Amino acid sequence: MAELIVISTLNGVLFGMLLFLLSSGLTVIFSMMGVLNFAHASFYMLGAFFGYQLTRWIGFWPALVLAPLLVGAVGMAVERYGLRNTHKHGHVAELLLTFGLAFAIEEIVSMIWGKSPVDYRVPAALDFPAFTVFSTNYPAYKIFMLVVSVVIFIALLVTLKRTRVGLIVQAALTHPSMVGHLGHNVGRVFMLVFGVGSALAGLAGVIAGPSLVTQSDMAAFLGPILFVVIVFGGLGSLPGAFIASLLIGLIQTFAVALNGSLASVFGPLDPSLGASPLTDIWNVTIAQIAPILPYLLLVLVLIFRPMGLLGTRES
Amino acid sequence: MTNAPTPSIAVTKQEPGGALSFYGVWLIAAAALIVLPLIFSSGGSLTSFSLIGIAIIFALSYNILLGQTGLLSFGHAVQYGLGGFLAVHAMNAVASHNWPIPLPVIPLIGGIGGMAFALLVGWVMTKRAGTVFAMISLGIGELVASSSLILRSVFGGESGITTDRTSLMPLFGWTFGPQIQVYYLIAFWVMISAIAMYALTRTPLGRICNAVRDNPERVEFIGYDPHVVRYLAYMFAGFFAGIAGGLTAINFEIANSAYLGATQSGLVLFSAFIGGTAYFFGPILGAILVTYLQLGLTSVTSVWQLYFGIIFIGIVMFAPGGIAGILMKHRPLIRAGTLGTVIPSYLVAAIPTLALALGVILTIETVARFSGDAAINLLGIPFVATAPTTWAAAAVLVVGGFLVARITWRRVAEAWDRAATVARDRGYLA
């Protein structure tokens, strides 16, 4: 049991930090431009596939730098030539544009790399067990992922809170026109933020690719969870996104690791009852309901605390 | 988000003979539904017509949310799928108990299923419009789709639940075994639902829905609760989506968890938006086009969904009013008789635009078939995906088409402005 708790906590924090790499960009983009970027998880997927392809061509370490930059460039192009032109048609049109993009990117990826998982391996330099807890070998690559996410997290925090650029970005979040009057190019700030957000998502993809499955449906799988994270944390709140990321990461990981069901706690139901929704619920294991837990959380949060954990506004 | 300027439905004054042309449209539609299978009587076209009919009801029901009330839903397939499942269970129950309920009533049960679910979750969901509604509809969609795989006894797991539509009581000698009888059943429900949904837009409720879409704050000032209005709209949308789901269950004699999924929700959003959400007939056009493309493209190319995505992005970026919006934009020009001055510039712009489209198609097919079957047949011209000449042709078409199209479309805009000014001078709003 202690082993399960230690390993699951490690994995949960890791998954949570990955989620935060994605949700931080998403929530900053949302509070700045008012656009919920449906294609954000697609940038994560692009990062994984670019990482895979570049790893095959030039090796993992150059790919770790180049792939996020490429994804960032794609993101900036999307902002500059897509969203900026759609802005005049209103937020619904912008949201739908990113929705269409997410759809198209998934199709393009599965067209180029196929629908089955690609063979994106952990680099040989990191392919060894870092330490052994109880009897489980914990892979060094996961520690590497954790370190990268924590470094990025600190860098993001310092940039936003301690630098001039961060100051301008923070100001542009709430008072874009005032920032414009002070002589800053708000359009360029938006484009840069969108690019950096996409690049972070891409980075998450590059480092998560070898550990999780790199497949053309990974965006469709992660995208909804991402939205749960930022709604749960409070739309536009970066600390909220951080807490929600860790929380959902831990909940997901622990749920998958637990195998209990109502039947294992209270004993099996009388077989004479036959097949009914009750027997389904009675026999389902916590691991099986893990995929729906985030959505249950979302519904509960929206009922009891519509602004999310640390959010300040309702919509 | 709800304050975004969306073109509202034009409230035209009743002209003399307006009633005749109004009822005429519906009569022509009904006649077309009856005559169509007599003209195109092959099995394939009957199946297509049935699917298009269902898609029309589904897209119209979606537009009660998006077009009329301004609610962007990413989980509309939930009501559709639940309606389908309830219909399948109802059919099985009716058949096993020998109840005297004929098949044409079953879609109504599906509709009630969709409405009941909307009744259950709608109050919480419609508390807020805009992004929050979009997110929660997405969340509920995922929740229900994932739960359907857990509750195997109700949803039948991955394989779904099957039924036999001919096991119900025959009606006037119709057993609904042959596809033609199912087609007429669907056509009947298309007509009924379309009339009902159109009537809904003309009721005070329909009008206040438009007001909630455009300015919820002022609706509150005149004494209505926007939340209640959104809730009602959500229930009606769920009802008609459930009817569409019930018809699908009858048509395929199966309901499975794919009915509830995100793909289905995405397709109905595409249909409604490509057709145009500002006009009642927009989603009908969109449903016909999307279903037709879906059926037609799957046999031609393996990446048909990508074409959907591209068409959708194009519509969102360049014509957010959809097809209906483009058509209705020309109405004042036709009335003022100035459309003729725009047409030449359209024809000029059509050539590079077509070249651009062909270039994009050639590029996509080249990539898609690079490692498999390399033969491409575009407009009767054979291409080989691995040949550099094909890549060059695609590049020339895309780049050249784009550069020339940009110039010609600027000319179209100028010609359009001139024609619209003349139309305005003659007293027709443009």
Image (tube, coloured by chain):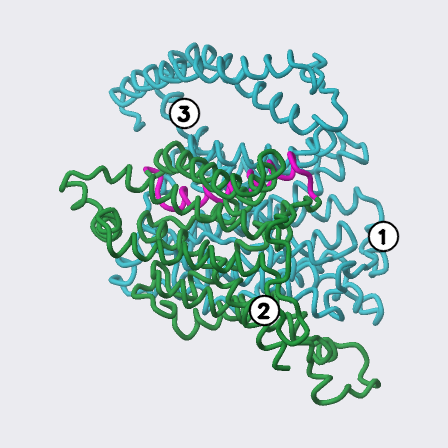
Chain colours: A green, B cyan
Q: Position of residue B385 (x, y in %)?
A: 69, 20
Q: Is residue A23 above or below residue A176?
A: below
Q: Magenta stretch?
A: A88-115
Residue with the mark numbered 2: A253
Q: Is residue B406 above or below residue A37?
A: above
Quick check: B304 above or below A302?
Answer: above
Residue B387: name its quadrant.
top right
Separation of disc 3 and disc 2 at Cα?
57 Å
Contact between marks 2 and 1 (CB within 8 A): the answer is: no
Mark 3 vs 1, N-terminal side: 1
Where is mark 3, residue-wise? B330
Does residue B163 belong to the magenta stretch?
no
Q: Chain of mark 2?
A: A
Question: Residue drawn at (61%, 81%), measured in percent from left and top?
Answer: A2
Q: Is residue A97 within the magenta segment?
A: yes
Check disc 3: other Cα within 10 Å, few if <14, some if 14-19, many if 20+: some
Q: Could you tell me residue B418's position as x and y percent?
A: 29, 16
Mark 1 residue element: loop
Q: Is residue B257 visible?
A: yes
